[in-house]
């Protein structure tokens, strides 16, 4: 969405490094893609099939509600809550960069090596894993959306999170 500083945009760096492909038109989004949507009422689970693609819409956190009002094809799911490790939102609950969001989705859906490789493109990337390791492992072992939400509730009750 070109709403961030280009030098700090994690999705732009993923594209430059050929770790992601940019989508310039909503019509390019396939029906079976998983769309990471922080406003969704449905939560990503380990059983999600990412073979049709994973889409992270890169926009400013200030514009999230406006951006996700648009009709976007695909299966819109939110990530379970995690702590951000990126320098702009470090330690904030749920305010992940595009890189962190993509890595979290990969990790939760049993693509752990790919998630770890993706996070290596920034010095702070591995910190995301160390901050969230127990949560990511618990989310990835959940049998259902209810189990994911139960893990989230128990973990973030202490922080006064969105549980």
Image (spheres, rainbow, N blue to C red):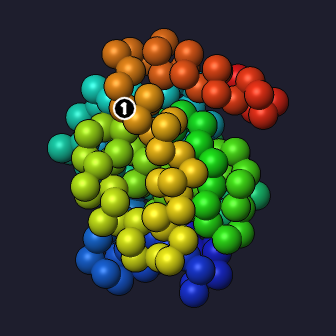
- Which residue is at the front of the view, 99 or 133? 133
41 displayed left or right of 61: left
Image quadrant for the N terminus? bottom right
Residue shown at 67%/71% (left/top)? 87
Q: Is residue 14 above or below residue 130?
A: below
Q: Secondary structure at mark 1?
A: helix
- Which residue is at the front of the view, 99 or 52? 99
Q: Residues within 10 Å of mark 1 (few under 14, many from 20)?
A: many
Residue shown at 25%/47% (left/top)? 111
Q: Is residue 90 visible?
A: yes
Which residue was labeled with disc 1?
Answer: 140
Q: Is residue 2 above or below residue 145?
A: below
Q: Quadrant of residue 35?
A: top left
Q: Residue furthest left?
A: 51
75 displayed left or right of 99: left
- Which residue is at the front of the view, 163 or 35? 163
Image quadrant for the C terminus? top right
Callout count = 1
Residue shown at 54%/22% (left/top)? 151
Q: Position of residue 159 (x, y in %)?
A: 78, 34
Q: Position of residue 132 (x, y in %)?
A: 53, 46
Q: Residue furthest right?
A: 160
């Amino acid at each position: 969405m070109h709403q961030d500083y280009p030098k700090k945009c994690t999705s732009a760096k993923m594209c430059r490094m050929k770790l992601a492909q940019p989508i310039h038109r909503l019509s390019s989004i396939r029906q079976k893609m998983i769309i990471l949507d922080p406003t969704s009422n449905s939560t990503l689970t380990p059983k999600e099939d990412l073979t049709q693609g994973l889409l992270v819409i890169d926009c400013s956190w200030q514009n999230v509600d406006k951006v996700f009002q648009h009709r976007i094809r695909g299966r819109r799911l939110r990530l379970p809550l995690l702590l951000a490790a990126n320098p702009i939102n470090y330690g904030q609950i749920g305010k992940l960069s595009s890189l962190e969001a993509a890595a979290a989705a990969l990790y939760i859906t049993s693509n752990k090596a790919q998630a770890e490789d993706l996070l290596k493109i920034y010095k702070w990337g591995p910190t995301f894993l160390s901050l969230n390791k127990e949560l990511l492992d618990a989310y990835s072992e959940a049998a259902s959306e209810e189990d994911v939400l139960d893990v989230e509730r128990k973990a973030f009750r202490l922080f006064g999170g969105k549980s």
